[in-house]
Amino acid sequence: MGEVRLMKGNEAIAEAMIRAGVDAYFGYPITPQSEVIEYLTAEKPWERTGMVVLQAESELAAINMVYGAASCGKKVITTSSSPGISLMQEGISYIAGSEVPAVIVNVVRGGPGLGTIQPSQADYFQATKGGGHGDYHLIVLAPASVQEMADFVPLAFDLAFKYLNPVMILSDGVIGQMMEKVELFDPIPRWTNEEIEQMHGDWALVGYKPGKNKRHVITSLDLVPETQEQFVLKLKKKYEEIEKNEVRYETFNTEDAEYLIVAYGSSSRISQKTMQLAREQGIKLGLLRPITLYPFPYEPIRKLVPQLKGVLTVEMSLGQMVEDVKLATECKVPVEHYGRLGGMIPSPEEILDVLKTKIIGG
Amino acid sequence: MAQDIKISPEEIIKKGQVIFKKTSLLTDKVFSYCPGCGHGVAHRLFMEVIDEMGLQSDTLGVASVGCSVLSYEFMNIDMVEAPHGRATALATGMKRVRPDKIVFTYQGDGDLAAIGTSETIHTCNRGENITIIFINNGIYGMTGGQMAPTTLLGMKTSTTPYGRDHRLMGYPLKITEIVAQLPGTAYVTRQAVHTPALVRKTKKAMQKAIKYQLEGRGTTFIEIVSNCNSGWKMTPLQANKWLEENMLKFYKLGDLKDVGKK
């Protein structure tokens, strides 16, 4: 058993970076995730593992420092919250467009605009449907516990390097700020420059040695329409692979469920309690929790449709994931959305009431 | 005492003897730059310096957005192409994870002194141990000759068709003077490449910048005041003359800062 600690989600993700052999963190403080860089600068990972930690002058600079360092085949990560993630979108699009692996964490707060510093899940569209310009996808992981804040860091890097694609950990202010027991995985060493050359020398910038290796240029620019089209089609193939291989989700009490809640992140935690309350009242309610928001678990939801009388999605937004749930159910069963906004968090009882009035009674 | 040395041209240049050739650190790709533009000379000089110092495999470069967006097609080293204005942020990330490499950016005035001003100043202020090559031609060349932050007062561009008026468009920005004030910079200099003498000086400045980077002294910053005959709507010769008579009056050549000089 690994070391067990009581930690905030933001602290867990920071500690996990050091243990996952991350080479560099570049970030800019923003509530509700500033504990990440505070934890790192207090912990001095440059002494523990040689990991670089740098407070950038803006989120724009931070994501581009990520882009540069990640181009060298290093494990590089940044964290921010909604307005900061909006600023990073240009860089994220470039990273996706030049097929560089990197991890971006969004501890979501309410918007639009400066919005609020309180928790929200209103960045679903931004995370899963693009965010920046052009045809691309991020792989999006949605942790629902402090444990997963830690565990998803190495998972995110595995996926980023497997597909040479940026990965987003889409958390929220609840998961970032709350404290829970977390079992920390044992540290793995950082890759040496020689290991990087061996493993990623086919694309990473390691220095051009004529006659010994190929020269590498990392760019998202291609002015020739024919080849740029071929490149985007190549990306499409990659996304199809990701959709085939990487769908992750979790189900609770779906075997006999007549009603289903679909919820991710902190909403899924609250909805677990709703499910308990419903079961106590004899309502056969199940829960499906997408762990990957892209690729979205369309098929697992589709398979449940024949047994269902109705589906409720719970997200702290005006209703974003609900569109994917409707796509999954192909409108063969009523799908309703419930969400609180602006930093308001729904209670389990409130969700049960909505289920009764909108789905069961409706 | 000058001696009367009698050497025939044939003795100096023997038949078949190579006296100058393109460095192998420039690819064979034909430059996308207009004839007469200073970019080509600046590319060659910098690649010669990296070549002569034996640093090809130890150098990583960052291309920027502007006329030199394709500089990675001409410079025969590992490079990454940055979003507009962000080159020094990328270089910061690269140098921080590969302090064993020489890292440089190659940027124009729009990229470095307008959209990338924040990155430029903060990179220099942190004293990132990188080299910044900054081409200042007072105009946006690639997008077709619009006003740059460095456009001179009264200068006509496609977005200042009646000349730059400070009441409407502010003043030309001497960003090199700004970064010279910052404690993080080790060497800040302004050079030009439109005469053979200045070409030699610029090359020396580049050698010094790389030497300082090898010594870990901090940010080295070389502005090259250049021309844009297409954007300025002049012949290359007219453009060089105009540069001499106008640009250099405002952008004075020489070292602004050199920590190595006592």
Image (cartoon, rainbow, N blue to C red):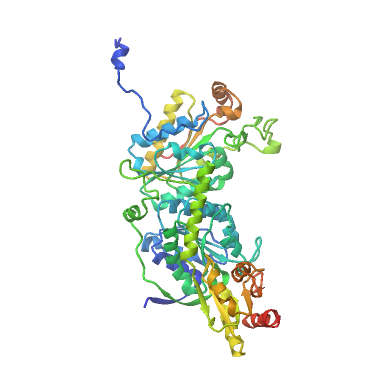
Q: Is residue A345 above or below residue B241?
A: below
Q: Return the x and y of residue A190 as percentages of the image width and height.
A: 36, 61
Q: Is residue B106 above or below residue B231?
A: below
The answer to which of B170 and B234 lies nearer the viewer is B234
Q: Residue at x 49, y 77 (%)?
A: A180
Judge left or right: residue B198 versus residue A358: left
Judge left or right: residue B171 versus residue B15: right
Q: Residue at x 57, y 39 (%)?
A: B110
The answer to which of B186 and A89 lies nearer the viewer is A89
Q: Return the x and y of residue A5 as percentages of the image width and height.
A: 43, 76
Q: Is residue B56 visible?
A: yes
Quarter of the image where the C terminus of chain A is located: bottom right
Q: Is residue B238 above or below residue B185?
A: above
Q: Residue at x 44, y 27 (%)?
A: B199
Judge left or right: residue A53 versus residue A336: left
Instruction: Report the number of numbered marks.
Output: 0
Q: Is residue B187 visible?
A: no
Q: Return the x and y of residue A273 as percentages of the image width and height.
A: 57, 83
The answer to which of A322 and B127 lies nearer the viewer is A322
Q: Return the x and y of residue A122 as percentages of the image width and height.
A: 62, 66
Quarter of the image where the N terminus of chain A is located: bottom left
